[in-house]
Amino acid sequence: MRASTPGPAPGSHLIDRYGRIATDLRVSLTDRCNLRCGYCMPPEGLPWLPSPTLLTDDEVIRLVRVAVERLGITEVRYTGGEPLLRPGLLKIVEATAALRPRPTICLTTNGIGLDRLAAPLAAAGLDRVNISLDTLDPERFYRLARRHRLPDVLAGITAAAEAGLNPVKLNAVLIRGINDDEAPALLEYALSHGYELRFIEQMPLDAQHSWRRDTMVTADEIVEMLSLHHRLEPDPTERGSAPAEMWLVDGGPQRVGIIGSVTRPFCGACDRTRLTADGQVRSCLFSRDESDLRTTLRNGASDEELAIAWRRAMWGKKAGHGIDDPSFLQPERPMSAIGG
């Protein structure tokens, strides 16, 4: 495909040269996390971003407002690191809910601390939550996350449901040799509680750059494992730009999703733009390039000037992530610094 115009039209939404329009904004609120999951960061952790480089609460709120009011964003998802570690999270969610047109507001979290914050977040305007849950076994949880915090995660999941943050969605990454036999048990847990489970292929976003495609548990393998216990049928609902391929379980209505980011890429329908905790626009999760909005903002740019800079950043988005290309290189930043 080739661009039909030399650049984004003035006053347009976040369109790229392939005609895709970004309506889903992912905002990382911090690179810090209270777990040390091996597919994200090493046991000793990582050097955190210096505080002066981080967007303030008011700067986050302003950029989200520009995205919603001037760039057509309809869904805002707050991520991390671990977004529950952001002291101003409630203020940010409340300000986002006050925007017009009001975007859908979501949160991706590991669930630790959500037992205390689920109800206040719902009151502030949070609509939905995605919670990471890779295992139901405490010892496996420690092996995966290097912290004994599984009870806290389960308590957070329960609190999210009780606070009405439904449907509560669970995200699971299977690691070969550790929890790759647990797919059926995770699905049974989700089905019995009325949660929506999504399995996500492990992606090359770890700080150690140790990811290998031949050790990744693939979408095909996950379908095969689940099919030994349940009848899976493709969900006839139009998928659109959703990353998960949905399957009806035993005829429905309950479903399970599989996000085959590596083996079943959905780049052609991608509708996402990303803002890091230090104010960089990323057009793709796997991009090695970023566009600095923080400096533009702090130099006194108007809302329209910020919108123009954001449009330019998204116009250059590549056709796909290129993981299968021999020249593919992982992003320098790990997942914890990019935002999920």
Image (tube, grey):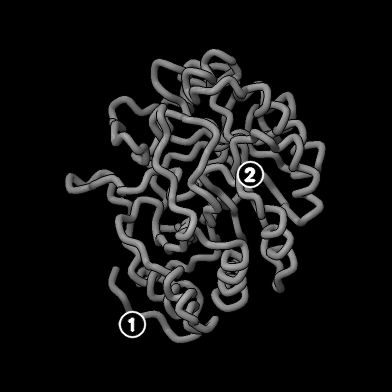
Which residue is the site of mark 1? 5
Question: Label 1 is placed on what type of residue?
Answer: Thr
Q: Is residue 125 visible?
A: yes
Image spot of residue 175 (x, y percent): 42, 24
Compare residues 129 and 218 and report the one nearer the observer: 129
**Above or below — where is 196 with respect to 5?**
above
Question: Label 2 is placed on what type of residue?
Answer: Leu
* Circle 2 residues within 10 Å: few <14, some 14–19, many ≥20: many
Q: Residue furthest left?
A: 326
Compare residues 228 and 69 and report the one nearer the observer: 69
Q: Is residue 56 left or right of residue 327?
A: right
Q: Secondary structure at mark 2?
A: helix
- Quadrant position of the N terminus in the picture: bottom left
Q: Residue at x 59, y 25 (%)?
A: 231
Q: Residue furthest bottom?
A: 10
Which residue is the site of mark 2? 84
Q: Residue at x 48, y 36 (%)?
A: 200
**Above or below — where is 147 with respect to 104?**
above
Residue 9, quarter of picture: bottom left
**Above or below — where is 128 with respect to 187?**
below
Given this view, does label 1 or label 2 mark the residue nearer the observer? 2
Question: Number of marks in the image?
Answer: 2
Q: Is residue 220 left or right of residue 327?
A: right
